[in-house]
Image (tube, helix red, strand yellow):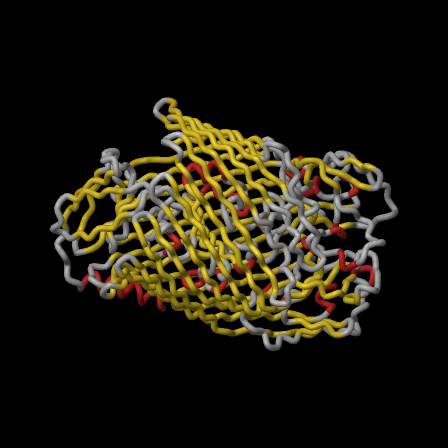
Amino acid sequence: MFKQSLITFAITSAIFSSQASAAQLKGKVLDTNNQPVPNATVHLHGKSQSVKTDINGQFSINVDQDSQLHVSKDNFINERIDVSPDSPYVTVKLAPSSVESVVVYASALHKSNIEMASPVAVLGGDELKNSAKPTLGETLKQLPGINASYFGPVSSSPIIRGLDGPRVKITQNGLDSSDASRVGPDHANTNDSLAAQQIEVLRGPATLLYGSGAIGGVVNVVDNRIPTDVIEGVQGAAEFSHDTNSNTNTVAALFEAGNNGFNFHFDGVTRKGGDYDTPLFALPGEDHEDHDHDEAHHDEHEEHGHDEHAEEEHGEESHGETEYAERVANTFIDSEQFNIGTSFVGDHLTVGLSYGRIETDYGIPAHSHEHHDHGDEHDHDDHAHDDHNDHSEDEHDHAHGAEEESVFARVKQDRWQALFTYAMHNNWIESIQVRAGFTDYEHAEIEHGAVGTRFSNETTELRTNIEHRLGEWHGIIGYHFSDSDYAAEGAEAFTPATNTKTHAFYVLEERRFGDVTLELGARVEDFALSSNFTSGHDDHDDHGHDEHDHEHEGHDDEHMAEVIDYTLDTTNFSASIGAVYDYTEGHNVAVNLSRSERAPLTAELLSNGLHIATSTYELGLGYHIEGDEVHFEPENIEQERSTNLDISFRRFIGDFGYTVNFFYNDVSNYYYQRNTGYMYTGEHGVELADHHHDGALPVYQFESADAELYGFEFDAHYQIDARNRIKVFGDHLRAELDSGEYLPRIPANKLGTSYRFELEDFAAELSAIHYMTQDKLAQSETKTDSYTLLNASFSYDFSVSGVDLVGYVNVDNITDELGFVHSSFIKEQAPLPGRNFKLGVRGYF
């Protein structure tokens, strides 16, 4: 009803508002040397479309009321000028920016990254295309303040300033990705970098627009699946690349066409590759009889170490009692996805619809189930990763009677998106925008030729923005609705089925006071999580949570299962105040203070079962251990509250530019996992760790405590001359509880530098990133040594038969350095890839 009311209001206002006389405003965009700036974006506030300048920098746009013209181009400083239907020919000059300057779609107020009060990083253009990896985490991890969870190269999610999982919202064109990547680190996100125009990372809380799940930040993937600008004629691109390390081939294509405001869009990506190679590394041992169980932390996953039968097939060697490997098994990928969309773009109206389909199979390293069959002789021949790539489940499972069988994930997603934008003929309402989406997601884990666990998530989302001007204030008010039905069935269903529903209203306003731009924002969100599940050990046995359960049927009969109908209903409130002070030309300082609240999500609140991927038994906040019994007693569940201060210093003019961000995040009731000192087996259930049983896994439970996260990140450029540029970047983070304990899996600090050379159509870049030793350890963690990654890239622009082409070669990890990722749950079993050559060619037409 709300959506219908908004649309009705828009149409009614269009019919009955006073019609201003329209006029064609013509102009030219020049740089500081009076040279034309082609392909600059010219947008009129209150319009639903933009126009691009031609090769001579000229443009023409309809103006039917007093408004503001916004002119932008990447790596130039934005310009805004007041115009009216009577304005004469205008000339706009853009000054070059020494810091990459890009309009941020996620800002909602048409701002560039150097104009925002909160820190933002943007990766786009050829830089994004050349560096794109199968996952967002691997694509973005070189940015200051950004790291990756790294469950292998095909399942790696972004970490923003040490926060990940449910604290980082991943969106596509502003709508939630709605996959299961927030549930577990072995679940890949469904956003592909190759299909994106740009990827935006909003550091720090972005809860005002995107909800309580964005308490740590937002990663917004922007694509053109619903075209919002007029496309004239036919255009497109195609790309092929090959990675030598994992023998991966990637093919991507883009096609767009338009006529008289009607547009069509298609993009598709296929990617197929095998297991990846590493420098020689020692596999974690499997015999833990002499180890204290408290050392069996899930970061190391020693209980589920490497397949014993895999020595011959994965390049393993045995040196005495220690096994070594030069390949990480079960890290293949076979993915296909496409998006189609259509739209109509008029002077004031834009409507569009898109559909996307994803089908991906990928291996999950260190995710195997042992099967004890002592009556047979086991043949260990030729069970190579090529079998995975064929994806014949009959061949994949039991192919050689192996003791331990690898598990792979099969992901399918259908995603619909709709867009309605109406630009009003009104002096105070500029536009109304409605974005809606429906996502049907399924993640199945295949073992023994059958689905062992199936995760599903159906999400409906609606976001409505009303952009307005009230006197000197410019802003948006909005409504955000989300309804998510999540379910998990099978051996790894450690979380129950839940429905999560949110309704939220928000407001974001800005006003210019001389050299200072002030931003104010607030959001009120009604959050309801409901679940009907069985509490007690019986539910784990029924779902097959442990391979030993069938040997001990009925051992938990004394613990009667209880059916629980549970609802958590709370109100989350977020607010922020920020300011940007342009204290001299090309320099500003930004300060942003925000307070955010969020409620626990399903995994944090209701987990109760084996999480095989992390080799732990997990319990949520709602459970308590008494003796050897686990009880569901969700009393006094408090919200996680974050107070965040960001201070940014920027210089973006001349040959030298920089961005330096300082941040301090004080979190009350921070949800984190702690080793309880208990162990779990299917036979004995939950017991204290001093009761030693083979195959026992540590019990980790979510708890809440006050925490502090603080640090800085920086990015500095110096343009030596027209051909040479150097860059230095890095970050530092400290994260600890008020008790003085360090938080788990906090990424190592990094320091990097790069040198870029350009000569006409040729470009080359050499970079080195040093990841420092991480010895600020949480309970049971082990130190992660430092390492340095040396990378190079080369590209050459040329044309064949009128088609513009770019050929490129990237060399990653030139020195074949062995590196372990401290933030990874499987640090010791999955080091970073060794030396890799990526060769590619991209064409535009």
Q: Quadrant of the N terminus?
A: bottom left
Task: Report the quarter where the C terminus lies.
Answer: top left
Vertical comparison of 614 with 845: above or below: below
Return the residue nearer the eye: 710 or 813: 710
- Name which residue lies at 80% across and 58% down: 292
- Closest to the observer, 525 or 5: 525
Specify whether 470 is left or right of 592.
Answer: left
Instruction: Specify whether 515 is left or right of 166.
Output: left
Placement of 381 over or under 453, stated as above or below: above
- Reply above or below: 405 against 700: above
Q: For the view shown, which residue lies furthest in the right direction?
A: 375
Residue 2 located left or right of residue 14: right
Of 711 and 549, nearer the camera is 711
Q: Position of residue 614 (x, y in %)?
A: 68, 54
Which corner quadrant of the image does residue 101 belong to? top left
Query: Is 556 positioned to the left or the right of 18 in the image?
Result: right
Instruction: Give the number of marks.
Output: 0
Q: Give the farthest residue toward the front.
A: 584
Identity of the residue furthest to the bottom in this view: 635
Q: Tell me if I can see residue 359 in this picture.
A: no
Residue plotted at (58% across, 40% down): 334
Q: Position of residue 420 (x, y in %)?
A: 33, 56
Where on the picture, by quarter, is residue 669?
bottom right
Relative image position of residue 575 (x, y in whole percent): 42, 68
Classify residue 184 by image quadrant: bottom right
Q: Could you tell me residue 47's position as x and y percent? A: 25, 53
User: Can I make out residue 294 in this image?
Assistant: yes
**Residue appearing at x 36%, y 39% in the figure:** 655
Q: Residue at x 83, y 60 (%)?
A: 551
